[in-house]
Amino acid sequence: MPSSMPTPRTHNVIVFGQTGCGKSSVVNMLEPTTDLAPVDNTAFGVTFHAQSYMKTVEGISFRVYDTVGLNEGLEGRVAAITAIEQLYQLLRELDEVNLLAYVIQASRITPATVSNYQLFYQIMCEKEVPIVAIFTHLENEDVMDNWWTSNQGVFDQRKMKFSGTACITTIKGKRGLFEKEYAESKEKLKKLILHRYKPKGWVPDKKGWFQSIISKVAFRHRVAPSKLASNAVEALVRIAGMTEQEAKEKAGQIRESVEKIINEKKNAMMLNST
């Protein structure tokens, strides 16, 4: 009687960053390159929902999620609300999270760079998931890795710590001008994911998790304890720049809409199994 082989585990990687940083291009550099994320060069980008792609690194399966991130300006305000909603829904649906990959355009260190780090790593994932930084647009550097050596202090000052980093380019350039740097970058990405992902991933406490997130954000932004229960959402929205009323309404909408989506999916699965 042949023995049944166990199904290989698939590990979850969440890729995030600001519009134009190269998230989708980073995803597309991982094998297989047949499962590609759409790439767009316009100011508004194309990644407004968490899209997943199956990738394999040294025989280990990863499901990579290309997500929205916080941005600057008016469109950034909308993206921040969308990011919170999409990330909350994504984390509620995943069995576990094994790695956060923060894609940062090397020449653009902004307040949103810090806000993204705080939202994804410190608040939503409660510092329980390893986070790596992938710095892009470095094809013109003589030695790409030297950029991190010169700029690490900037991130240290902002208390942004990473489990690992990769300084890369996501383009080959005209007539293959950066072909060597691109090939080097692909290898860096593979090693970074393989060496830094957490085999036993983090699973959020889904019952009290959302309220816990709001409370932590309120504490981070020094909301008075007497206001914490009723106005904690106010602090959450400061990341997105909303008013207190908008914060309360949006937080309620997010929770209700996500729970509705998840319940609908559960009901559909039950119907399909009967």
Image (spheres, rainbow, N blue to C red):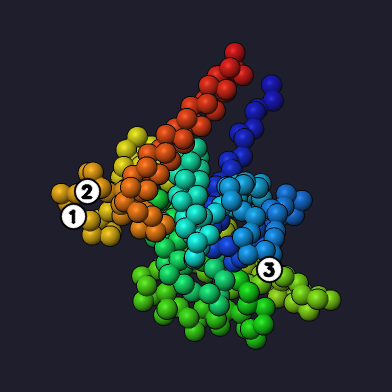
Query: In the rendered image, is residue 74 in sight?
Result: yes
Q: Residues within 10 Å of mark 3 (few under 14, many from 20)?
A: many
State which quadrant residue 3 falls in: top right
Frontmost residue, 107 versus 192: 107
Residue furthest out toward the bottom: 142
Q: Which mark is residue 88?
A: none
- Dot 1 alpha-carbon crowd within 10 angstroms: few under 14, some 14 to 19, many 20 or more: few
Instruction: Please give the label number shown on residue 170.
Output: 3
Closer to the camera in the image, 205 or 115: 115
Residue at numbered disc 1: 224
On-image quarter of the N terminus: top right
Label at residue 228 = 2
Asked if the residue under mark 3 is in contact with the one under mark 2, i.e. CB atoms within 8 Å, the reply is no
Image quarter of the C terminus? top right
- Work out whether 97 lies above or below 122: above
- Residue situated furthest right in the rendering: 175
Q: Are marks 1 and 2 in contact (CB under 8 Å)?
A: yes
Determine the CA span between mark 1 and mark 3: 45 Å
